[in-house]
Image (tube, grey):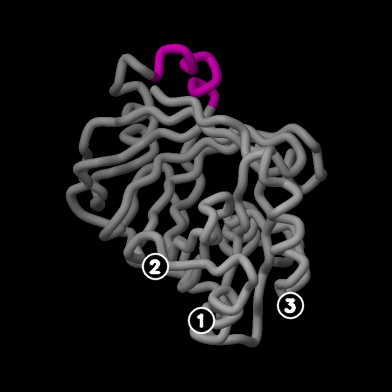
Amino acid sequence: MLLEEFRYERKFVIEGATLAQVELVVHLNKGMFFEEYAPRAINNIYFDTPGLDLYHQNVDGLSTRTKVRVRWYGLTAGPITKATLELKRKHGLLGAKDNVALPGFVLDEHFNAASAKNLLKASPKTAPFRDELDFMEPVLINYYKRKYFRSADRAVRVTLDFDLGFLKFHHHYNSFLAHTKAPPLIVLEVKYPDESNAVAASLSSHMPFRMTKMSKYVYGLDTLLSVRPP
């Protein structure tokens, strides 16, 4: 189990621009960003209470909120060999995660809500969170691609998320074939520790985009379940 230190996150949702155009903005920033890792595909199963309490924490703008998800990289469906339970805690712009490695599983038509809930309990390392997890059930799957950049002084990270898609999670049976693609948009995130706040604020001010609130979980739920207009 790994508890990450709290870090700041600034988000920019960009529409009407290509990935190449946004990358150019990042490269021209005075932070002299370089591509830190190879791009990869990210997949998440998001969990919530039956009353969607975690969804409403975000929509209602509560300063303290939580996300519960299982994350893995690569193909969305099929055998998953490396997955991680993440409990993400946010306080305003600050965020941190509890990370717990989970055993492998297969995402296919036999994987249902009971399978997902059992997965949360499959590792003894989830025991400290058992009371919290007992009330959770799977709500949706989202997936997207991510590119990673780091400032020359290594104080600030920028990620670009694109090609977002969603799958509704049904309680008993899931074919995982009814994909819903998001409209073309790019989510740019600036991530940094507290000691780099002044530097990150300066670099962010040179981004020609407007900082905004964006939760991919909330966006996906709005899109799939019509909880409210996306």
Disc 3 residue type?
Pro
Q: Is residue 52 visible?
A: no
Q: Which is more N-terminal, label 3 or label 2? A: 2
In the picture, residue 213 is in which quadrant?
bottom right
Q: Position of residue 148 (x, y in %)?
A: 45, 62
Determine the residue positioned at 70% across, 66% down: 230
For label 2, count other residues whose C-alpha is less than 10 Å away and answer few (under 14), some (14-19) or many (20+). few
Disc 2 residue type?
Ala
Secondary structure beneath dot 2 equals: loop
Q: Which is more N-terminal, label 1 or label 3? A: 1
Q: Position of residue 118 (x, y in %)?
A: 33, 27
For label 1, count other residues whose C-alpha is less than 10 Å away and answer few (under 14), some (14-19) or many (20+). some
In the picture, residue 201 is in which quadrant?
bottom right
Reading the image, the residue beneath label 1 is 19
Q: Is residue 131 visible?
A: yes
Query: Magenta residues, as a range?
Result: 126-135
Q: Quadrant of the N terminus?
A: top left
